[in-house]
């Protein structure tokens, strides 16, 4: 599907971003092996999280949709999962395949899990390695580096493991496997990545200790305590409106009910540092996660240099930061972000190519991007590469680009934010 976005004379209104995708996956996976029933509200409507629902159902977990966004999960305890009768399909979702691989590595049966073309090209050796050290039998295509994965579960043993990259998916896979292992497991990250798994595990009674970048889990014969959750809005979805509001010359957008977990706050910190008029209001805690309303207005942005340990805290928002950089005064440099090359697509290459089509002065670095700002973008044709975050990012660029922007394969937004195009149309509806 092609989506046309026209320059908007004004951006006004309120948005409620969909439930957080990362928290939604974890809420289902962890409650599936808890010792009873839990209710999950504001569950992400994206196709990624629906893939997790489908896989868990194939593993014998009863998940009932009580109403849109409200699910009940009947946890089967530590030994209740069943061998799937068919291949599990994680679709486009790396969180699904990686977190479930951690779970499946500890089950006494065989599972095969695959995904779509994009997911089947993403690195899995980094996942297979620690699971094998724990005693799991895991194989993959391409010399054990790519999905589909075949996983023959075993009684696992605890390990001490230094993660080669700051990846919440890897950390979570190892911690989930560790719930079923004999002996403690310690994982150490090179930099902090999102900590939703750790927060949820603690809230469900798991024995978890953190010491700087090191996390130790002591397994318990008792299953996790079921956890009812109201999932906060996804800051990675909210981020589109934060950037839209900041770069547009006549904007005021209120983004309600957004998770502001410090391990996800990088985008807010960078926008503030670039000079964004962005306020955080009504801070509260929901389901063990900090939540707030965010108000953004037209701003005069200046370019910044970003890198180091900030990167994992805004990893999914980098294409948007590049768009902010195009409009900002001065130069924006993004480094230490080589992980972007192994996301749904190579987001460094794609951001450079597609924003160049819109008139950006942008160059590619091995691990990032360099953007010379102060440009007025002009409408053009952009490709999403079937990557949800890129489709949405080009939509935001289209709101400030002169004329019309056509985004090809725009339906990709449905992986995380099915209502994105209608929110965009509503906020820009006063275009004259
Ligand atoms: C996610 C972690 C991040 C992020 C992805 C969701 C998660 O990936 O890019 O969209 O839910 O754990 P990595 O942990 O591989 O960096």
Image (cartoon, grey):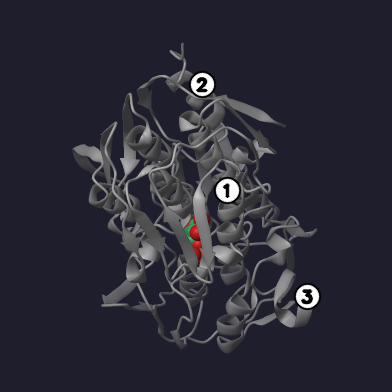
> As displayed, is residue 277 above or below residue 402?
below
Q: Position of residue 203 (x, y in %)?
A: 32, 58
Q: Position of residue 108 (x, y in %)?
A: 67, 75
Counting residues from the start of the chain, the first of labels 1 and 2 encountered is 1
Residue wearing tag 3 = 141
Determine whether, in the image, residue 194 is placed left or right of residue 22.
Answer: left
Q: Farthest right residue?
A: 86
Q: Nearer the viewer, mark 3 or mark 1?
A: 1
Determine whether, in the image, residue 108 is placed left or right of residue 336.
Answer: right
Q: Which dot marks residue 425?
A: 2
Q: Nearer the viewer, mark 1 or mark 2?
A: 1
Circle 1 SS class? helix
Front residue (pair 214, 255): 255
| Label 2 CA crowd tier, 10 Å (few <14, some 14–19, many 20+) | some
Front residue (pair 427, 52): 427
Circle 3 SS class? helix
């Amino acid at each position: 599907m092609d989506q046309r976005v026209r320059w908007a004379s004004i951006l006004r209104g309120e948005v409620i971003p969909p439930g957080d995708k990362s928290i939604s996956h974890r809420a289902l996976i962890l409650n599936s092996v808890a010792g009873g029933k839990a209710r999950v509200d504001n569950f992400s409507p994206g196709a990624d999280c629906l893939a997790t629902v489908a896989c868990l159902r194939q593993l014998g977990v009863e998940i009932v949709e009580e109403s849109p966004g409200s699910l009940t999960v009947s946890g089967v305890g530590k030994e209740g999962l069943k061998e799937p009768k068919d291949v599990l399909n994680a679709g486009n979702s790396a969180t699904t395949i990686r977190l479930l691989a951690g779970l499946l590595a500890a089950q006494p049966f065989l599972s095969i899990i695959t995904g779509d073309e994009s997911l089947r090209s993403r690195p899995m050796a980094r996942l297979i390695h620690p699971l094998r050290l724990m005693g799991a039998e895991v194989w993959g295509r391409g010399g054990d580096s790519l999905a589909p994965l075949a996983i023959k579960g075993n009684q696992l043993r605890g390990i001490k493991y230094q993660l080669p990259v700051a990846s919440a998916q890897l950390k979570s896979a190892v911690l989930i496997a560790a719930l079923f292992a004999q002996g403690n497991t310690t994982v150490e990250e090179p930099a902090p990545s999102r900590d939703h798994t750790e927060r949820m595990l603690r809230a469900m009674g798991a024995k978890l200790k953190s010491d700087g970048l090191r996390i130790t889990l002591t397994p318990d014969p008792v299953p996790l305590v079921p956890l009812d959750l109201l999932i906060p809005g996804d800051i990675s979805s909210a981020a589109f409106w934060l950037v839209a509001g900041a770069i547009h010359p006549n904007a005021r957008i209120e983004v309600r009910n957004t998770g502001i977990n410090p391990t996800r706050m990088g985008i807010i910190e960078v926008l503030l540092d670039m000079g964004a008029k962005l306020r955080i209001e009504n801070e509260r805690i929901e389901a063990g996660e900090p939540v707030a309303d965010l108000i953004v207005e037209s701003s005069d942005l200046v370019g910044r240099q970003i890198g180091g340990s900030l990167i994992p805290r805004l990893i999914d928002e980098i294409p948007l930061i590049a768009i902010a950089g195009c409009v900002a005064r001065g130069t924006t440099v993004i480094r230490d972000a080589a992980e972007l090359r192994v996301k749904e697509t190579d987001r460094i290459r794609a951001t450079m190519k597609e924003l160049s089509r819109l008139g950006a002065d942008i160059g590619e670095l091995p691990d990032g991007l360099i953007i010379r700002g102060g440009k007025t973008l002009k409408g053009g044709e952009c490709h999403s590469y079937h990557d949800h975050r890129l489709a949405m990012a080009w939509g935001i660029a289209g709101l400030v680009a002169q004329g019309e922007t056509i985004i090809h394969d725009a339906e990709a937004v449905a992986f995380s934010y099915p209502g994105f195009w209608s929110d965009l149309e509503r906020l820009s509806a006063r275009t004259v």
